[in-house]
Amino acid sequence: MSEKDRRFWDKAARKYAASAIADEEAFARTLTRVRELTPPGARVLELGCGTGTAALRLADAAESYLGTDISGEMIAIAKEKLADAENRDLALRLRFRAATAETLAEEPDCYDIILGFNYIHLAGDLPGALAHIRALLAPGGLFISKTPCIGEVNPLLRPLIHLAIPVMQLFGKAPSVTSLTAASLEDAIRAAGFSIEETAYHSVKKNDWRPFIVARAPQ
Ligand SMILES: C[S@@+](CC[C@H](N)C(=O)[O-])C[C@H]1O[C@@H](n2cnc3c(N)ncnc32)[C@H](O)[C@@H]1O
């Protein structure tokens, strides 16, 4: 785990919690699809859950739901939101804790579904993170990801982004970011032993650069 990234996200947490969801319609479509893919009794792990926005809206579909994040500050806010939640039953199945795929792999549990929203491009070592995710899944379990793929951005803007990120990182204003395309992410997921079952785009906006990918671990 990168201490630098943890500090970056700890600092960003309160501001992130106050920011609005960029595309509510697309987010609703994503949540609906995840619910459809969640079988009764599912044990769900979310990586990079931030302040728990998706977890609080999905946990009722799961038998158990563990929301995790590298940032203790993000997790503290997620816990505050859970304590304030109107649906008191959520607390029976939803837990939050500071952890990464790497640290969880040291105490393996078997999850039926692992979720990562706006996460895997930030996870640092992509093959390493995917290997941990596969190890944490039960045989035949699902990894579901929706994350920005910078390589899908408008080609006119792409060079600017590629230039800006390292400069911002130099000044501590950006975390580790892997530049992906939908195809390169699918390839990396396949290389980790998964089969891709679905790639979809949930935004009606023209340039959706966040593919929703459903990948199945081998039986
Ligand atoms: C862009 S935010 C997305 C948060 C939430 N999933 C959402 O969609 O609103 C990225 C989150 O990933 C977390 N993160 C970054 N690197 C991580 C890592 N290596 N392991 C776990 N979480 C990480 C950050 O702390 C942050 O909360």
Image: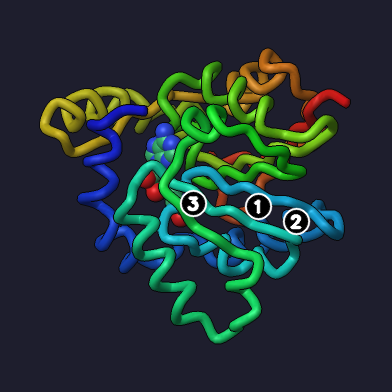
Alpha carbon of mark 3 to alpha carbon of mark 2: how far?
Answer: 18 Å
Q: Quadrant of ligand 1?
A: top left
* Above-or-below relation of 76 to 160: below
Tag 1 residue: 202
Whether residue 192 is visible, yes or no, is yes
Q: Given the image, on which type of amino acid does mark 3 rest?
A: Cys
Residue, far left: 171
Whether residue 122 is visible, yes or no, is no
Alpha carbon of mark 1 to alpha carbon of mark 2: how far?
Answer: 10 Å
Image quadrant where one finds the C terminus: top right
Q: Nearer the viewer, residue 117 or 84?
A: 84
Residue 208, image x and y in percent? Answer: 56, 45
* Above-or-below relation of 4 to 194: below
Q: Residue at x 25, y 52 (%)?
A: 12
Q: Residue at x 26, y 29 (%)?
A: 165
Q: Residue at x 33, y 51 (%)?
A: 72
Q: Residue at x 43, y 46 (%)?
A: 69
Residue, far top: 191
Tag 2 residue: 33
Q: Given the image, on which type of amino acid does mark 2 rest?
A: Arg
Q: Is residue 21 rendered to the left or right of residue 30?
A: left
- Cβ–Cβ under 8 Å for marks 1 and 2: yes
Alpha carbon of mark 1 to alpha carbon of mark 3: how far?
Answer: 19 Å
Residue 163, image x and y in percent? Answer: 24, 23
SS of the residue under disc 1? loop
Q: Given the image, on which type of amino acid does mark 1 rest?
A: His
Q: Is residue 92 rendered to the left or right of residue 84?
A: right
Q: Residues within 10 Å of mark 2 (few under 14, many from 20)?
A: few
Tag 3 residue: 49
